[in-house]
Structures are given as structure tokens and as C-alpha cells.
Image (cartoon, rainbow, N blue to C red):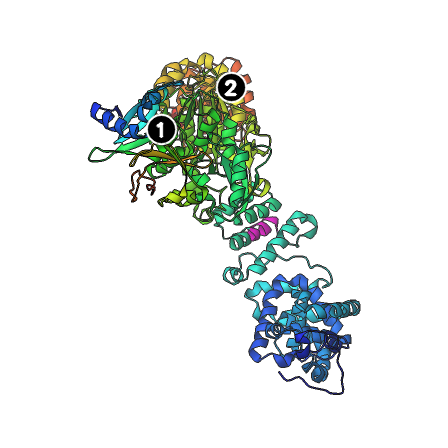
Amino acid sequence: MGRKLDPTKKEKRGPGRKARKQKGAETELARFLPADADESSKRLSSRARKRAAKRRLGSAEGLKSNKSPGAKPLPGKLPKGAVQTQVSGKKGASPVRAVGYGGKRPAPSPSSDEDEEEEDSEGGVVSQGLLWGSEDSEADMVDDYGANSRSEGEEDGGEELLPIERAARKQKAQETDLGSLWSEEETDEEEGAPSAEPGPTKDDEQEGELQINVDEEEPFLLPPAGEAEQGAQAADLQRVHKRIQDIVGVLRDFGKQREEGRSRSEYLSRLQKDLAAYYSYGDFLLGKLMDLFPLSELVEFLEANEVPRPITLRANTLKTRRRDLAQALINRGVNLDPLGKWSKTGLVVYDSSVPIGATPEYLAGHYMLQGASSMLPVMALAPQEHERILDMCCAPGGKTSYIAQLMKNTGVILANDANAERLKSVVGNLHRLGVTNAVLSHYDGRQFPKVAGGFDRVLLDAPCSGTGVISKDPAVKTNKDEKDIQRCAHLQKELLLSAIDSVNATSKTGGYLVYCTCSVMVEENEWVVDYALKKRNVRLVPTGLDFGQEGFTRFRERRFHPTLRSTRRFYPHTHNMDGFFIAKFKKFSNSIPQSQPAPGDSAAAAPATVALPALNGQATPKAENSSEPAKRARVAGKAKQKQKHPKKASFQKQNGISKRTDSELPTVPSVTKAQASSQLQNSGPPAENAHLTREPRAPGKLTQRSPKPRAPKKGAGRKQNAPAMGSDPQTPAWLSSKTQAAPNSEDQGQPPERARGAEQRKQPVPRPSLKKAAFRNQNGTPKGPQSPLMHPRSPSRPPPAKRRKWLPRGSRQPPPEADS
Amino acid sequence: MRPLTEEETRVMFEKLAKYIGENLQLLVDRPDGTYCFRLHNDRVYYVSEKILKLASNISGDKLVSLGTCFGKFTKTHKFRLHVTALDYLAPYAKYKVWIKPGAEQSFLYGNHVLKSGLGRITENTSQYQGVVVYSMADIPLSPLLQKKTKTRDNLPPTPSQLLQ
């Protein structure tokens, strides 16, 4: 393009071809440094100017903080007009920029000096305005400059950077003087520019931020809640991202940085929406993750889910050694490393020039592609030679083959999967890897003890919601909701109980079960484990994995058994492997507790309560409480138990283990304790029901509740309350046994409460109340076999009041029962 | 799952004998227990008795696989040997053929091997002899039927080699 050729000027030129075309760097720079006017405005077409302005506006939100830096150059403009304008001119329009800092600039700049100056004068104001959205052609340059300075100084060519930096520094110095001026101007500009911003919220933010001294980081202002900004904001991810960071920063130091009048929950809800928008999550899942992780970890977790985990493989020691395999693969051009100290057979692949899944070594079965976290459950299981192992959900066969290689092809492995398609992959993998001691079957895992039982060890890699492997399957972000999680949890509970029943507790070398999922949800992990602890004669043992985060022993309103600390959680952002959860059980008795858990054992057999997941959470503490009263109740409650059995039977089915019901019935006597505990747990809702019945009991029979677990009773029609499943059965039992006790069963908590005369039907209190109840019970109010009529009916609170009087049993109950 | 009938046993053993000759007995009586062949869904599985016991608990329609699959019977009751049988045949193979590294890749991906690709070969290997192909590192790659002249695909996974 036309360079003004000034023969009088002699320019220094560098060597090289380009030097002939361009003037030397020094000359170029010289133009700028003296602060020549930059005619960037000339360069920009009207469209380009508009685009630039829009860009500035668009980035205004997210780049609020940049305003300051941006502002700095602007002030500099005033005094130094030329420098800044030139810079801005250069940066001003992307087209301009694109052109390059080189030759073009110098040419126009001299001529535009005058323009620059004019602009500078208004630049103070205009530039600000441009930054925020006023679109004047002249202002564009200034704005661009601001925008550019915001966006990055490095936009400039290398040569110009240095001089510009110098200029910028000068400007900064001047800017501080002008700081106040700028802020005012910015404010004005901001207000003027809202049009460009979508929605009113932006204005609020801008204004709020503007009011603060621009030199400092403006406190983040929360956009008004409930604004219909969705559409507008979704469009600008950068802005959303910035806002996420701001909110996290504010919440980290909420006391100081909060905005007046805004509650924490507003911030949180805003953050949730932003995160959902930015990372493309559904609201449900994001809400769950927010409950699970502290905020700083949450962002890391979400970030980690965007990135795939490194490829890892496991050497097949049946056919080769890790050393040899690594050597062979390196020869093929694969860049790999041993996986870590904790694995003797794992390798992590950094990059590879050949497809990892197609090398001759792979075809010969020397290794298997397997996630690092999938190696952990097998290491925890620690199968020994000559054992009988069951792998309940084996597809695609990675864990099964690992088990086989640890056993060196001795013993027997029964590999099962419910999905026929995926079983084919298991066949292929096992044959390829040279596993000879495996038998594959295609059963639903819940049928297991019937088909074959008495295994030394069982591995259950339960089907789950997949929230730990989002990086592999991003669809999980949006297609999971409450129902899915509940369904998964239910299935997992059933499978786990079947698996427990398939283990032979008296095995000489085994008796272990490993339960693992690739999910991070508490409903699928700790809760299921806790449930199993209550229902079967198992206990948790250390997994043998010395790294990983411990499982939760409490989560929101739920409380789990303390041994859950020995379970392990793995996260993508902390361990760089897929999200995983591993729990190792040891079965210490082959009998299936019907209603009575082994004394002192965490395993409580609450048959009825299966269906009440919510209740389970509370189990542990209650269980302990209930055990006390349960004991007492036992004394009196044999009769009740009999009653309970029928109910239990119906509930038993829930577990899918029909035999339980049968067994339960006869063995009930001890139920009370177990039931009490279980009831307690489930009793959340039942408790309420029990309240009604219990009231009368108050005096202290509470313990008798054992029947609580009798969810079956509900079937009997006690409706009392939906949750009352457990409670219903119990109440009848109590009733029969003792006046007071009747409602106990479910509401163990309640009786205690009632005893105190407290009306609280709330479950929370149960625990402490139970203890009290226990004491009371000791007094010997036998639980008479109350008429089954009594159902703890929560709905009718008023009647309970009556009952509180502790009328003679039987009398009370009918009236309150009426509603039931 | 059922044991093989006489006829099936005969057919299968004939096939195996092409590769391992009279070493067949070694397959059955192994130091770590007795192994046997079982037929399930037209496939022949080679299992040890311990595994057999467990597998018999599983109903037929739910059983998918057990032990190692040696091969299957076609509809016309011919026996096709599978590559999964390789691990058991290789130690007892009577005739072996080694191929050069260059030809190994091509062989693995299904191509025939030219004579020039052969490294070593057991003596007295007649035409159409069943051989086990090894790589130079003594890794058994596949059993094959060797052809002298033209190629003929014999075993499921691999082509035959082309000899002179």
C-alpha cells in the first residue's frame, strides 16, 4: 500500500529480503514512540468499527477487571496521546491488527497526528466510552486501544512491544493522577452503554463495578437473581467463566467480599447456573456435585472431566513381563512409563505412533487396555491361587483377566454379566489374554446365590450412573436425574446383597467381597455400603490401597457407619484416574440376619426397610441406640415378633431374596434389637407415624419397637404414612406387646420422644430419645401384644395428643388408629 | 454342555493330529489335573475338571464359555480349529515354521507368506502339512497348513504360507 516515500529521510535497514520492503524496525518504532497520531480510525471501516465496539462491549463484563489496565493506557493517551493512540490504533481493529504492525502503520500515523490529538482530548472520555460501548468512529481508536490493552499487550509486534511498554508505564503514572477522572468517565460511559449489554443485569453489574475505584479489582457483583439472562449470558462463555471465578473468589471470603443485601444462596444459585452453562451440565447433576465438593475442588473436578485421562494398560503376566512388554512397545514407537509405585503391571502411555489397540503384542494378548482406577478393585480383592472367585458384572473383562493373572490361571473364576452383547467382548478378551480358568455365564446378578454360591471372593463392579467417568462419556452430564440415581442405587443394593450371599464366610482363605462403582455419588456408594452393613453379617475392612480419599461417614443429613472410613474414593482431579469408589467387605457369618443383627455388629437386618433409602442414612447411630432398647424389648416382645414376621416376609421380597422371609419368621425373637435399629434408621418417616401410636407409650416402652423394620406391616394396610413402612409393622407389634411399645417399632425415636411427652414426631430426635426410652423401658413395661390396630399414624397429630396420656393400651390406640 | 461323541472326538483329533501328531495324549493328561473337552453350542472347549464342576451348575442357555475354546464344528460337522487353541498346540507341534520379522507383520494381518519370508523350517515338512508358525522370537503366531505352491487358506485366522 502506498508508503509515503520521503527521500530526505534515510532509514536504517536491516539485512534480508524484507528489509527492502519494509523500513527498519527503528524507523517504525520511531514513529510510534514520539506518540504520533495513529490513524487506526482511518483503517477501520464503519463495520469494523462497529465490530470493534461490540467486542469491547461484549468483553466489558468479563473484562471488567481489565478496565483498569485498559484505563491505564487510556489516560496515558491524554498526555501522550500519540503513543497510546498509536498502540490503540494498531490494536484498535482486528483488521488493523491483522494487517500487522509493520509498515502500514507508520505511513498513516504521521498524517493522523492531528486526528490523534483531537481524539485524545476526547479520548479521556471517549476512550472510556468506547471501551464500554459507545461507538464513535473516532472513539474507536481510543477504545480499541483500551480493548487491546485489555486483551493483551502482546498483540503488538515484538518490536513495538517494548516501546509500547515504556509508553504504557508512562501512562500508568499519569493515569494514577487521572484515576478519578477515569472512573467518572467510565461510569458515564457504562451507563451509556448498557444497550450493548444484554439484559439489565449487565448494567447493574457494570454500574456496581464502576462505582468502585477502577484502579482496584472491582468487587464482583452478583447479577440480579432470576434475571432472564440465560440466553444472553449463555452466549458469552468468557463472561460466564469470569463470573464463575469471581463468585468462587467471593464465596471463599464471603464475609469480606460479599455484596450487601445478597445472600450466600443467591451466589450459590448463580454459580450453579453459570457452571451448568459453562460446562454443559444438567442442573440436577451439578447440584449434586456442588453438595459433594467444596467449591475450589468443584471447579477442578469439572475441568478434569473435560479432559480425557491418560491411556493406561496392564501387562498380562500370564504371557509376558512388564519389563519385556515395555521394551517391545517402545521398540514399536510407544512412549510409556510405569504407572506408579502402587502397580506392578500397569503402564501409562503418553503418546504412540502406532495404534495401541492393534499392535501384535495386543493381538497376542500381552497386555490389556485398562483404566488405572479399574486395576484398584482387583488389587483390593487380592485373589489367591486355587480360589473360587465370582465376578458379577465382568464386561468387558479387564478385571476378570486381572484376577486370572493374579491367580496364575489356577482355581476357577465365574465371570458373569447380564448383558449378552458385552459378554462377547469378555469372551474375546479372556481368550486373547490366555485365561483358561474362567467360566462365563449370562445371568442377572441378583440370581446369584441360587445358581452357584460358596465363593471364596466376589467382585462386584456394579452398574452405576457413571458420574466418575464423565470424561469418557459426556452424555452423563445431562441425562442423569434423580430417578436414574435412585434406580441405580436400588439395583446396586440388590446386587450387593446377592453378592454377599454368594460369599462363603467360612472359606479358609477368603470370605471377602469388593464392591466398587465408577461413580462419585454418595447415594450409590456410601449409602449402598451402609445398607449392606445393616442388612447382612459383613463388616468393612481396609482395602489395602494406601492412597485415595476416604469414604464419607456422614453426608448432609445422613450418617453412615464409622467403618466407612476404610472405603476409598478416587477423583479425576486429584488422582488423575476415573472417579471410583471401592469398599471391601469381610463376611463373618453365613447366616442371614433376619431382623437381628449380630450383637455389636453393624450389620442390621432390617428386612422391611429396604425400600426406604432415605431412612437408611440414619441407620448407624440409631442402630446403636436401638440396640439398647431392642434388648429390652426382646424380653417382652416375642409375641410381637411373630406378628412382625408376616410383615417382614412381604418386605423381604424387596431384597429379592425370598428365603429371607422364610427364615426370618422363625428366627425373629431377637428381632427387636435389629429391628429397632433398622427401624430407627428407616424410621424417619415411620417415626412420625409412630409418634401417634407412641404417644401413649411414652412412658417408655419405646424400645419395643423392634417391629419397626416391619415394613411389611404397611402392607397390612397401616398406611400411617408412606414412610411408615417400617413403622407400621412395628406398631402392631408393640401394641400387642405393650401399650407403650407399639409404635415403638418404627419410631424408635418417637417413643423416646413420647416418653418425654414431646410431640416431636420428627425423626431426628429419635436417637437420643431412644436412649431415654431404653431407660424407661427398663422399668418393665412389657410390651404387651398390643392390638395390631395401633398403627403409628403420623398424619393425625391431634389424636396423638390424646394418646400422650398413656392410656391403657388398647384404648388409646383405636381412636388414633381410626384414621389408619 | 456335553462331552463329545465318538464321531466328534474322532474328527477333532484327526485335525489336531495334523499339528501335534501323536502328542494328543499330553493334552488330556496334564500335570495339573485332567482336562477334557466339552461341547457347547457346537464349540469345543478344553477345560480342566475343576472348572467343569462349577460350570455344570450353570444352565445351558446361560453358559457362554468355559475354559478355552479350541474350535467349533461347522454345520457339516467339520472341525475348525481356532487361534485360541494355539497356546496348547504350540508346545507339542511337530512341524514348525519360523518367519522373518519383516514378514511377520504382514502375516499377522492376514497375508500369505512368501518363501523369502521364511526363516527356518523343520525338516521333512511335507506339503500341506499342518505347521505352527512362529516368529523369530519363538512366539507362536498361528497354526497353518502349509502349501507348497499356491496359497490356500486353511485355518481360520491366518492364510497359508506360500512356499516355493
Magenta stretch secondary structure, dominant: helix
Which quadrant would the N terminus of chain B be assigned to in this image? top left
**What chain is tagged by disc 2?**
A
Residue A286 can be seen in this image: yes
Front residue of B15 and A509 = B15
Circle 2 crowding by C-alpha within 10 Å: few under 14, some 14–19, many from 20: some
Q: Which residue is mark 2?
A: A601
What residue span does the magenta drawing correspond to? Answer: A263-271
Front residue of A793 and B143 = B143
Residue occupying the point 69% across, 76% down = A19
Which quadrant would the C terminus of chain B be assigned to in this image? top left
Front residue of A664 and A328 = A328
Front residue of B161 and A493 = B161
Asked whether the residues under marks 1 and 2 belong to the same chain, the reply is: no
User: Hey, what amino acid is under mark 2?
Assistant: Asp
Q: Residue furthest bottom?
A: A7
User: Hey, what amino acid is under mark 1?
Assistant: Lys
Residue A649 can be seen in this image: no
* Image coords of residue A669 (percent x, y): 42, 14
Q: Which residue is mark 1?
A: B94
Residue B121 occupies quadrant: top left
Circle 1 crowding by C-alpha within 10 Å: few under 14, some 14–19, many from 20: many
Q: Is residue A269 magenta?
A: yes
Classify mark 2: helix, strand or loop: loop
